[in-house]
Amino acid sequence: MSIKLYGLVGSTATFRAMAALYEKDLEFEFVPVDLASKEQKTPQFLTRNPFGQVPVYEDGDLTLFESRAITKYIAEAYADKGTPLTSKDPKKSAIEAVWSEVEAQKFDPTTSKLGMELVLKPKWGQTTDEAVVSEFEKQLEDLLDVYESRLTKSKYLGGDCFTLVDLHHLPNVFYLMMTKSKRLFDARPHVSAWVSDIVSRPAWIKVASKLQG
């Protein structure tokens, strides 16, 4: 099998790349990386990603790291397969690029911090810092107000079709739906509908099932 994805089940970045592969109906080999033993820092792994992080994507003689770069390649290299994840129209593509930046620069930092406090710390037996949660929930509220306005104009953040923009949100959205921060999404009807839509996609259900597998 020419496509390999090296990563960790449960990792948001790994799940982002995996979701793109499933949306494209591509066969791939998943290669688990043991982060607990620091396998990602071994000399062998560092030849794939010099930063010692997951995921890493291999497709023939091509090796990529950074999950959003991986999904962009998958969307463009396999444009004729599965779900179209990017637009070929320059104006639509530009709008998708704007909201992709919003996800990477605003949504991901805020929700990752909440995920650390509300998901990972309890899992690790550590105490959640409620002051940090309050601070970042306020940031998320402000951001979701913008999302609510945007989603009154189009079904998805990038436009009327599901794209990489929405896909990139999925891992953090999925985890926050298991926490008290879910109420912030539920309180905004268009955001709530968008969340229900994207988390119920067959490709994402396949990804999420890995947590039970």
Image: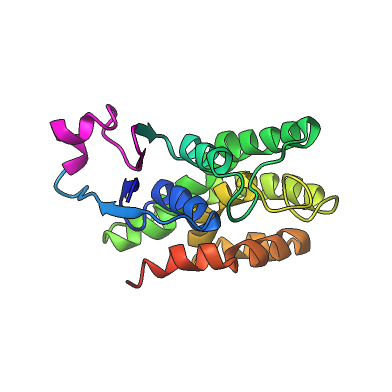
Q: Decide which of 196, 23 is in the foreground and name it.
A: 23
- Residue at the image position 62 percent from the left and 33 percent from the top: 101
Residue at image location 60% in from the left, 40% down from the top: 103
Q: Is residue 71 visible?
A: yes
Residue 132: tell me if it is visible.
Answer: no
- Residues in magenta? 39-61
- Height in image: 97 above or below 121? above
Q: Residue 56 appears at what percent x and percent y?
A: 34, 40
Residue depicted at x 71% and y 40%: 87
Residue 205 horizontal/vertical position (percent) = 50, 68
Q: Is residue 96 left or right of residue 132?
A: right
Residue 210 percent across, percent down from the top left: 37, 66
171 relative position to 120: left or right: right
- Say above or below: 161 vs 182: above
Quadrant where the image shows the C terminus: bottom left
Q: Residue 186 location, x and y as percent?
A: 68, 66
Residue 110, magenta (yes or no)? no
Q: Residue furthest bottom?
A: 212
Q: Relative to residue 145, is residue 39 drawn left or right?
A: left
Residue 106 quadrant: top right
Quarter of the figure with residue 165? top right
Q: Is the image coloured rainbow, by chain, by secondary structure, or in one colour?
A: rainbow
Residue 40 shown in magenta: yes
Q: Residue furthest right?
A: 153
Residue at 45% over, 40% down:
67
> Of residues 195 and 127, which is closer to you in this image?
195
Which one is nearer the viewer's eye here, 106 or 75? 75
